[in-house]
Image (cartoon, helix red, strand yellow):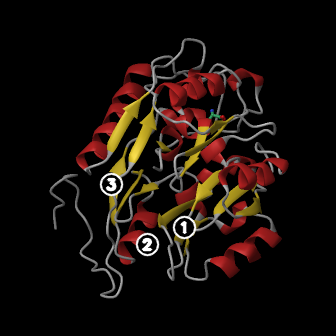
Amino acid sequence: SLDQRSGLTVLPVPAAPDEPRLPRARRYLMCPPEYFEVAYAINPWMNLGVVVDRAEAMRQWQELRRTYERLGHTVEVITPEPGLPDMVFAANSGTVVDGRVLGARFRAPERAAEAEHYRRWFGENGFRDVVMPACTNEAEGDFTWTGSVLLAGTGFRTDPAAHGEAQEVLGVPVVSLRLVDPRYYHLDVALFVLAEGGPGRSPLVAYLPDAFSPGSRRVLARLFPDAVLATEQDAACLGLNAVSDGRHVVLPLEATGLADQVAARGFEPVFVDVSELRKSGGGPKCCTMELRA
Ligand code: ARG
């Protein structure tokens, strides 16, 4: 069948009758890649010699934004700053749950100034409860809200002490997870939430087991026994850097196996091209901060 909104062919796999996949309207914050480039290398995806097509990056970003709007979501836009090429990765600059904001503190000095620009945006846009962290945390890069607990990554960027700080500031239970593969340096390139949990309903997530330490793999298996397990191939195109609204799953077009898996669970994959943004180690989710009312 042809999905009217995305114009993409959607596999005709029906949702299990007891589990309708209902989308919920979201509010996102994004930053256009006006000054995007690979000017330093702080993850294995970034190669200093590589040429970035900034116009193409902008087209891909616009298409991602339009995709969200077509799906019925609201997209807020923050003004990019010269000299901050990674500011396009909005997910790294704030964790918002129930209108409470925990700001970011970057590990790399090259990105440090981004946190303050986003803090100012929150202040100017009606967010009253904004706390800037004492510990290093790269926000939704390493913090993933499941609807009931905050999954928190560490190993490459976010300090483990930031997990306790997030629990205290946001007032939500935090579960720590250890990342072990440098290609999956942030939690949001190793795991994403397909459907949030709620009272009496556990969240559904997708992840790459090999990105986690043995203990964290056991934690994930215990918390999410029915999770979608991604393949190395789907993770290696940053397929797990996906954004779900509870029904539509926006993901890189190369992640075809993962798309089939989520379709079999009743979700609708929506493909986007992120080839330019991936040169910096980012995909759809990295460009998208969720503003949870
Ligand atoms: N070049 C950026 C960095 O290494 C990419 C950040 C991607 N963002 C994310 N949420 N994973 O910091």
| Depth order, front residue of 127/157 | 127
**Image location (x, y in percent) of residue 72:** 26, 50
Q: Which residue is mark 1?
A: 206
User: For numbered disc 3, what is the local secondary structure?
Assistant: loop
Residue reaching furthest to the top: 82
Q: Which residue is mark 3?
A: 25
Do we see residue 154 in this rendering?
A: no
Q: Nearer the viewer, mark 3 or mark 2?
A: 3
**Image location (x, y in percent) of residue 183:** 69, 47
Q: Which residue is mark 2?
A: 261
Q: Pick whichever of labels 3 and 2 is earlier in the sequence.
A: 3
Residue drawn 54% across the image and 69% down it:
205
Residue drawn 38% across the image and 33% down it:
76
Report the Cα–Cα distance between label 1 and label 2.
10 Å
Q: Residues within 10 Å of mark 2 (few under 14, many from 20)?
A: some
Q: Residues within 10 Å of mark 3 (few under 14, many from 20)?
A: some
Report the Cα–Cα distance between label 3 and label 2.
23 Å
Q: Residues within 10 Å of mark 1 (few under 14, many from 20)?
A: many
Say which mark, if any, is on residue 31. Answer: none
Horizontal arrangement in the rendering, residue 119 relative to residue 214 (left or right): left
User: For numbered disc 1, what is the local secondary structure?
Assistant: strand
**Image location (x, y in percent) of residue 256:** 41, 61
Residue reaching furthest to the front: 128
60 shown above or below 264: above
Q: Pick whichever of labels 1 and 3 is earlier in the sequence.
A: 3
**Image location (x, y in percent) of residue 93:** 61, 35
Tell me the quadrant of the picture where the N terminus can be found. Answer: bottom left
At label 3, which amino acid type do we have? Ala
Horizontal arrangement in the rendering, residue 244 relative to residue 248 (left or right): right
At label 2, which amino acid type do we have? Gln
Q: How many marks?
A: 3
